[in-house]
Amino acid sequence: MTPNLPVGATAPQQAGGQAPASPRQQASSRRTAGYRRAARGAGAAPDTSTPGLRVRIGSPESVLAVIPGLLGFDPRHSFVVIGAELARREVRVTLRYDLPDPGEPRLAAVLAEQAVALLSAQGVSTAVAVGYGADGTVSPVAAAFLDRAAAAGITVAELLRTEGSRYWSYVCAEPACCPPEGTPFDGAGHPAARALRATGSRVLPSREDLAATVAAAGGQPGRAMRRATRQALSNISRCAARMSHAGEPVSTRRLTNVLGQLAVREAIRRYREGEPIDPEDAAWLTVALRQVRVRDDAWARMDTEHRDAHQRLWTDLTRLARPGYVAAPASLLAFVAWQSGDGALANVALDRALADNPRYSMALLLREALDAGAPPAMARLPMTPEEVAAAYDAAEAAEDAELTVGRAVAAERSAARRPGGAPPVLAGEAGRK
C-alpha cells in the first residue's frame, strides 16, 4: 500500500545521487566508473512547493504521476527512490539513478547500497521506489533494494516497475489488484500531475533535454560571444595600462575585481527587472567571474526572493560562456538550483562546470554536497556581500604590506651589490656612529 504523503509546501526536495559509501571504494572497473558517473548525474527534485498546494501521493498511479514533476524530466532507464518521513507525513528526498545493464549484478548491489545509505543518513523510515524499464533490467535492482532496505530497517511501502503505459508491483501479489499483465495508467492525465503543471512545474522529455538547457550556445550567439570575450580581455588590459601610464598603477586583476563587482550588481538588477543582457556585457561578466572575488560577490547576492531571476541570469551566462570561462557561472547556477530544490538542474550545471575545469573548487564542493544528499535548507549563503568585501580587502591589504616589505628588501640587496654601495639601513647606521 502506497503511503498517503503530501508533496508541496511542506515537502522539501533534496538533491540526490551518490551515497556516503562511495562506489569508488568498492569497484574499479571501467564499466563501474561509467556507472558511477551516471549515478552521480542523477539529481533530485525540483521544489514543487507553492503556498497552499499539497499534492498527495497515496496510490501507485499518483506516485507515477508526480515523479516527472519532482525530477523535472521524464525518467527513462532509471531507478527512482522517494524517501518519506511518516511522522511529518512529507517527502524528504527524491533520488534517481541510471539502471545498470542486466549483466552487471554487482552494480545493482552498488546502486541499492548507495540509495539505502543515503536514506538512512537522512533518517528516512519509509520509501517508495520505481524502476523504469524492462523486467530483466529493473528486477535485479529492485531485489537488491528490497534486501538492503530491510536490513537497514526501512519500510518499502511500494516498489513498482513501469514500461510503456503499464506498471507492475513487487510488493503486491494480489492478481485482482496487480494483474500479471500489468495495470494501465495515464500519468500525465492524473490529477496530481495536473496540479503540479498548474504551478508552472516544468517536465522535459529526458535528462538529456535538461542538460541541453545549459549546453553551450552555438551559431551566431556563440560566434558573437567569442568576439566579445576577446574584446573584453583586450579592453581590461588596455585600461590597466593607461591607468598605470597616468601615474595610477593598478594590476589587471585588481581592476577586474572592481569593475567586475559593479558588472555583477548591474546584471542582477537588470535580470530582476526582466531586461536582457547583450553579448558584450555577458562576455565581460564571464571574464570577470574568473576572479574569485567577483564570483564570491555574485554568490553572496543570491537572494532567495529573486531566485528565478538569478537562475535565468546564470543559465544564460552558462550557455553563453566560452571554453575556459564556464566553471564560475555554471557553479553559480548549480548553487541557485540547489537553493531552489532543483537537484537535477544543479547536477547538469555541475557537469558543465567540471567539464570546463575539473579542479574548480566551488563545483567540487557543491558536487560533494549534492552527492551526500544535502537538502536545499543547507544551501545557505556563505557570507553577505559586505563580509565578502571585508575579507578580500583584508587579504589585499596584507598582500600590499608584504609587497611593500619585499620591495624594500630587494632595494637594499640591490644597493649592497653596487660597488661601494651600502644598503640604506646600514649606511644610516654608519652615519650615526
Image (spheres, rainbow, N blue to C red):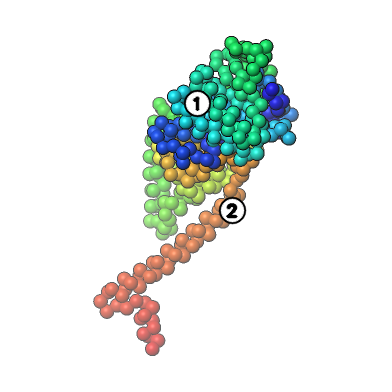
Q: Position of residue 19 (x, y in %)?
A: 54, 38
Quarter location, residue 413: bottom left
Q: Tag on residue 60?
A: none
Q: Amino acid at mark 2?
A: Glu
**What element does badge 2 sit on?**
helix
Horizontal side of 189 relative to 30 (left or right) equals right
Q: Tag on residue 387?
A: 2
Q: Residue at x 43, y 33 (%)?
A: 32
Quarter location, residue 358: top left
Estimate the spatial distance between the alpha carbons at disc 1 and disc 2, rounded to whole Å.
Answer: 45 Å
Q: Residue at x 69, y 22 (%)?
A: 1
Residue extending farthest left: 419
- Do the numbered discs 1 and 2 sit on residues whose CB atoms are within 8 Å? no
**What element does badge 1 sit on?**
loop
Q: Quadrant of the C terminus?
A: bottom left
The front one of 270 and 296 is 296
Q: Amino acid at mark 1?
A: Leu
Q: Residue at x 32, y 78 (%)?
A: 422
Q: Position of residue 127 (x, y in %)?
A: 64, 30
Q: Residue at x 66, y 26 (%)?
A: 157
The residue that label 1 is drawn on is 99
